[in-house]
Image: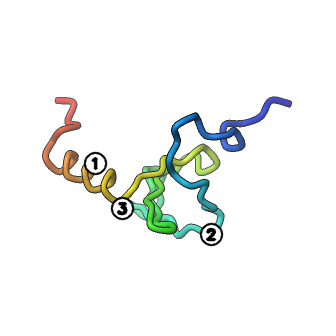
Amino acid sequence: MAETTTHQRPPTGWDKPDLDLSGAQWQSSSGGLGDVQIAFVEGFIAMRNGTRPESPSLIFTPAEWGAFVSGARGGEFDLT
């Protein structure tokens, strides 16, 4: 059986730890109704698809998360 992406080794140059997210306290702005969820784990921020919690999570440093949130608040990612 093929190995899933959740069990593959990180790509070369990956500088973030392999976090254990099994006990993470996931948070959602809509109460977990199928949207993006975040968790604060060991000084990092993990983000996942709430409709597919088994899929890989993105891991951000606090500086990366701050830049993302700032850009989102500033409309950097608006598609209109």
Contact, CB < 8 Å: mark 3 with mark 2?
A: no
Q: Amino acid at mark 3?
A: Ser
Residue type for callout 1: Phe
Q: Quadrant of the N terminus?
A: top right
Secondary structure under tag 1 reads: helix
Tell whether 59 sits left or right of 24: left
Do the residues under discs 2 and 1 have CB atoms within 8 angstroms? no
Quick one: 3 or 43, which is closer to the camera?
43
The residue singled out by tag 3 in the image is: 29
Q: Secondary structure at mark 3?
A: loop
Q: How far separated are the C-alphas under marks 2 and 1?
A: 25 Å
Q: Residue at x 64, y 48 (%)?
A: 54
Q: Nearer the viewer, residue 67 or 37?
A: 67
> Which tag, 3 or 2, sits closer to the chain's start?
2
Q: Is residue 28 left or right of residue 8?
A: left
Disc 3 from disc 2: Cα separation: 19 Å
Residue on which the image places disc 2 = 23
Tell me which amino acid carries mark 2.
Answer: Gly
